[in-house]
Image (cartoon, rainbow, N blue to C red):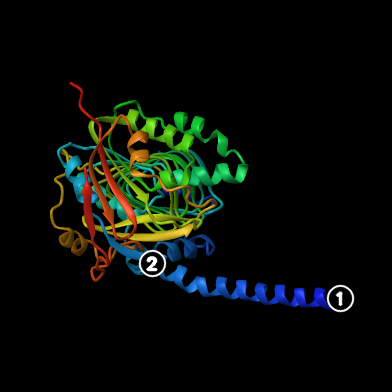
Amino acid sequence: MAESTRSLTDLFGILGSRKVETARAAEPSATKVAEASYATKALHKFLTCLQANENPLLLDLGPVVGSNVTFFGEHLGCRFRVEDLAHDIDRHVKAGTLDQLPDFFAKRFSQEPATVDGILCWDVMDFLDRPAAQSLATAMSTLLKPDGCLLGFFSTADTHDSVYTKYVVVDESTLKYRNYPATRPRQRNLLNGDIIKLFKDLRVTDSFLMKSKMREMLFRKPNRR
Amino acid sequence: MWKRDESVKPAAPPAPTPAAAPSAAAGAAPMANEPRAQLGRDMVNIGKSVVIKGELSGSEDLTIEGHVEGRIDLKGNVLTIGPNGKIKAEVFAKAVVVLGEVTGNVTASEKVDIRDNGSVDGDIASPRVAIAEGAHFRGSVDMQRAGGGAKPQQNQQNQNQQKPNQPQQGQPQPQTQPQQQGQKVGA
């Protein structure tokens, strides 16, 4: 018995050390993909959509990226508002109040309805449960002006790493993906139909499946006049 | 309202304050490059032990290492909030460099520059805004140029050439090439 226990211990010891080795082996690749440049097709269309408006109001749901503020400001002469939702998600995860996120998103934004010309939603929906995602999508649809547009990214990769991504605009057709730690992983991948249901008040004008395993989608709020 | 001789000197004389002046100079890199030149210009430091509540106005470049609450009006000059500076005020200046903390709206006729570890909680209105990686910013940015809306820029390359010395780490790298292409899958 003692012998068998000892051998099992040895076995677990072996498995344990292998696990550590796997983790160590993964670190360099994680570092490697921490910052990489990828093509984007929807960003150019998003900019085109906003260029007709004078001094448009742009809402960025990602973390503040200084060069993005400069880029959008100089390209569009816009008012740019940063609303870092990743920070909000982290705060709710730490407080254990994720179930309150739907109510939080419903009251989160101070802008009047139909006052925002463009929304950079990035991939924030991937980190939300369905009720929270629906609440945020409804809030975004309400904030958008008629003919306003929303840029959303949705992961198609089966990864559940606890990392957020900063999307740094290099130019109209290139984004730099810069990862940083998150308190929760990506949730279940949203299918095309799920996304369309989430943003049911908006119209999908473009959808691109990128080789970065990201679906880029551009939505536009119909002008019902 | 604010005058150098009356309000600043008694609390923290600029010249003999070794603690305040070097830290401000260390943080504000472009200014630190020409300390001798600064002596010739009108420029004042508010030391880190100084607390001002009320309206601060003047016609000289100003570096604040202390605490200011109220309103700062330096419409034709550069305001630098040093690493130790804490501002709770509406700020109006030609250019604002933030290395410390600002709570309140910032309006600049030329540029707002939030450096690494600088923090702004409030709305910014300026034709040029630079936010360094590691800086904290919460609020909105209005970069509308005076005299109407900005024309969208067509050439990103020109844009990069115009500001080669910006301190942002997230600045686009000209040699960076897209790694992958995408395909349209339907609308």
Is B25 located above or below residue A153 in the figure?
below
Q: Considering the numbered disc 2 on the image, is that residue within a helix, a strand or a loop?
A: helix
Q: Which chain carries label 2?
A: B
Q: Do marks 2 and 1 share a subunit?
A: no
Q: Residue placed at 34% from the left, 39% from the top?
A: A193
Q: Residue placed at 56% from the left, 39% from the top?
A: A98
* Residue at numbered disc 1: A2
Left or right of A163? Residue A35 is left
* Residue at numbered disc 2: B32
Amino acid type of disc 1?
Ala
Query: Which image quarter is the C terminus of chain B in?
Result: top left
Q: Residue placed at 17% from the left, 36% from the top?
A: A53
Q: Residue A88 carries which label?
A: none
Q: Who is closer to the viewer here, A162 or A48?
A: A162
Q: How far from the left and from the top, in percent, is residue A105?
A: 46, 33
Q: Classify 10 Å Cα crowding around label 1: few (below 14), some (14-19), many (20 and above).
A: few
Q: In which quarter of the image is residue B26?
A: bottom left
Q: In which quarter of the image is residue A84?
A: top left
Amino acid type of disc 2?
Ala
Left or right of B115? Residue B183 is left
